[in-house]
Image: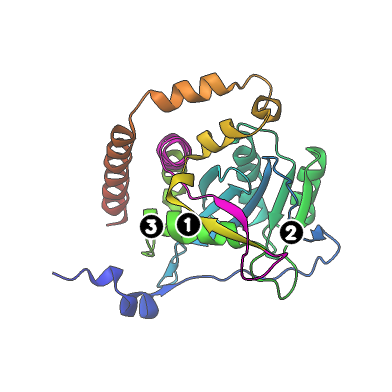
Amino acid sequence: MINLRNSAGYRNQRVVLTKTQPTKNTKIGVRKTPAPEGRPGFIRIDSVHQGDLDGIKGLYHINAVDCVTQWQVVASVQAISEAHLLSVIEQMLAQFPFEILGFHADNGSEYVNHKVARLLDKLRIEFTRSRPRHSNDNGLAETKNGAVVRKEFGYEHIHRRHAARFDTYCREYLNPFLNFHRPCLFATELADPKKPGRIKRVYRPRDAMTPLDKLASLPDAASYLRPGVTLLELQQLARALTDVQAADELNEARQALFRRAATRTG
């Protein structure tokens, strides 16, 4: 039997996905791309809406990805208003094992506002945002929106009252799996033989590794870590489960999460 709730026609008629609202705060943040120069700690962040159904608000997922290691932190929140979002951003920044040096967002008002700017300034984090007519400035986060967040949670409406439960799932199951067990492809820069002087990026299967492996491969990786965090501790956490065991645990937790959300919705 066809699942009508997952069909494009159902979503087009019943589910409303809210687009990012541009901000009028033109003096907040610097319009440029992050310049990590091989250093972890420059994250890109974006929002994913689970849709409004018949006037009932859906929750949002916040997706943050490090430019260099692809270390990813996903969180869920009732709404992207300043009242709900600020504490979530602070908690997300604390989940990265390394010091955060840069914070890059698109021009949505949920990020480009004075409260977020003050938080980042207090933490001494550079605040940058996407430039006009440069659609790839936040491309890494937007790619992960589809490859990870939508694949994990789909497009179906999820009531915002389930936000805390989904956030716990992200923190306890999804984020550890993404960073310790899920390989990512990393680009290798090579000289383009057809165009002298130009560099092209090549994605080779042998360059696939987890974000933790990528972090450990960086020169002087330990110097980027937060106080009290060591590579040995992170690697021990990763070895506590095999990749298959971690995937099975994730799937079981996800099924239980959606069963509970569906029961309470009904």
- N-term mark: 2 or 3: 2
Residue 234 x %, y %: 51, 25
- N-term mark: 1 or 2: 2
User: Could you tell me which residue is drawn at 22 percent across and 68 percent down?
Assistant: 3
User: Could you tell me which residue is drawn at 56 percent across and 46 percent down?
Assistant: 70
Give the CA separation, mark 2 to mark 3. 27 Å
- Position above or below: 224 against 9: above
- Which residue is label 3 attached to? 151
Give the CA separation, mark 1 to mark 3. 16 Å
Q: Residues within 10 Å of mark 3 (few under 14, many from 20)?
A: few
- Position above or below: 89 against 140: above
Question: For this view, does 250 lie left or right of residue 124?
Answer: left
Q: Dot 1 lies on which element?
A: loop
Q: Residues within 10 Å of mark 1 (few under 14, many from 20)?
A: many
Please tell me the numbered disc located at residue 47. none
Please tell me the numbered disc located at residue 33. 2
Q: Disc 2 or disc 3, which is closer to the eye?
A: 2
User: Could you tell me which residue is drawn at 75 percent across and 68 percent down?
Assistant: 131
Residue 237 x %, y %: 45, 24
Question: For this view, does 158 lie left or right of residue 136?
Answer: left
- Which residue is label 1 attached to? 59
Q: State the residue lying farthest toward the right.
A: 27
Q: Label 3 is placed on what type of residue?
A: Lys
